[in-house]
Image (tube, helix red, strand yellow):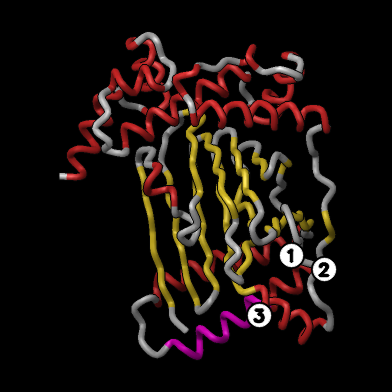
Amino acid sequence: MSILFETLHLKHFDPDALLHILNNTEMEHQLLARDNLTLHSEQLTIGDIDITVGDYDFSVRVRGSIPCDGKVYIGLLGKIIDEVRVNRSLVQLEQLVLYAPGCELDFHTLSGSNWYMLHLSLERLQEMAIDKLGMELDWPCQGVRFIDLSPEVSERLHKELRGLLQFGKQCVNTANTEAIESLISEGMMQMLAETIVQGSCSSLSRLSPGRERALNVLEANIYHWMEYPNSGFCVSDIEGISQRLLEMACQETYGVTPHRWIKLARLNAAYRELCSDSGASVTQTCMRWGFGNMGRFSGEYRALFGEFPKETIQRVSQSVS
């Protein structure tokens, strides 16, 4: 058993620092709108339980695959700043989100969020459920499952997590904590097993099948274009889906038009390229990602990332040297 505590505080968008924010799981972050643009994250490890708390104050989309490593992830909002969606479903404050191993995660917040993510052994959790509750947990085999919590259970869980993080800050360098660690780990496993069993599966607000399909087609086209950016791409190129349906689906889910969604994908791609220290010039990056006007590109880039493209190159160069 061991106690580890790490913290991350960012004052600007850093895709590399954010890539491995969840227990070294590769999650791509895309900036959607610039607000104050700070992020504070803390991670506590107690034995084989990892607890991560993150606080975004900007609109972001996070995408990636949940690993198949014998452990599972459980999500919980700490507070709701604005609309939050997981795999395009609205998430409420008093809900647990259970992630199937290997499932695709698509997390999106319109302006900011505060969340907890727990990473723990499913085998130990199942053993606890059988031992203490006499039953096995019905864990999802694919996708995500939402569990409704009562206000009392939700508050207890939030209070417990806040207390554990405070404990981790104070005791990370303390010797002879094995007995305490074991007690905390067992208590957390039992509480989570009881919470999942007592909770009820949620019926969430989801997109209609037509709008879901429209978004899937839009994003498939975007990511195909990202592999061949010089080919050019716009909303009118999408076939088989009405422009009106695309507009409604994109506005409902992401709060922007399809045209803006494509523009954001191109700007994030340009930002990642300039942050990669690849040696690409601003002009090369501008042209590669479909921006024909250098001045307009620089202005839109600065509005989203808070700095001009040349300033990104200079900042990255200084950090490398």
Residue 20 x, y percent position in the rendering: 44, 54
CA separation in Å, label 3 and label 1 = 22 Å
| Of 123 and 236, the residue lying toward us | 236
Q: Is residue 205 left or right of residue 48?
A: right
Please, what secondary structure does the residue beneath circle 1 have?
Answer: helix
Nearer to us: label 1 or label 2 = 2
Q: Name which quarter of the figure residue 7 lies in.
A: bottom left
Q: Is residue 321 left or right of residue 226?
A: left
Nearer to us: label 3 or label 1 = 3
Amino acid, disc 2: Gln
153 in relation to 310, above or below = below
Considering the image in quadrants, where does the C terminus appear? Answer: top left
Amino acid, disc 1: Val
Chief secondary structure of the magenta portion: helix
CA separation in Å, label 1 and label 2 = 9 Å
| Of 133 and 282, the residue lying toward us | 282
Q: Residues within 10 Å of mark 3 (few under 14, many from 20)?
A: some
104 in relation to 253, above or below = below
- Which residue lies under the disc numbered 3? 124
247 in relation to 16, above or below = above
**Disc 1, disc 2: CB below 8 Å?**
yes
- Which residue lies under the disc numbered 2? 198
- Which residue lies under the disc numbered 1? 153
What span is in magenta?
Answer: 177-189
**Mark toward the start of the polypeptide (1 vs 2):** 1
Residue 292 x, y percent position in the rendering: 39, 10
Q: Is residue 270 left or right of residue 55?
A: left
Amino acid, disc 3: Arg
Residue 244 x, y percent position in the rendering: 75, 14
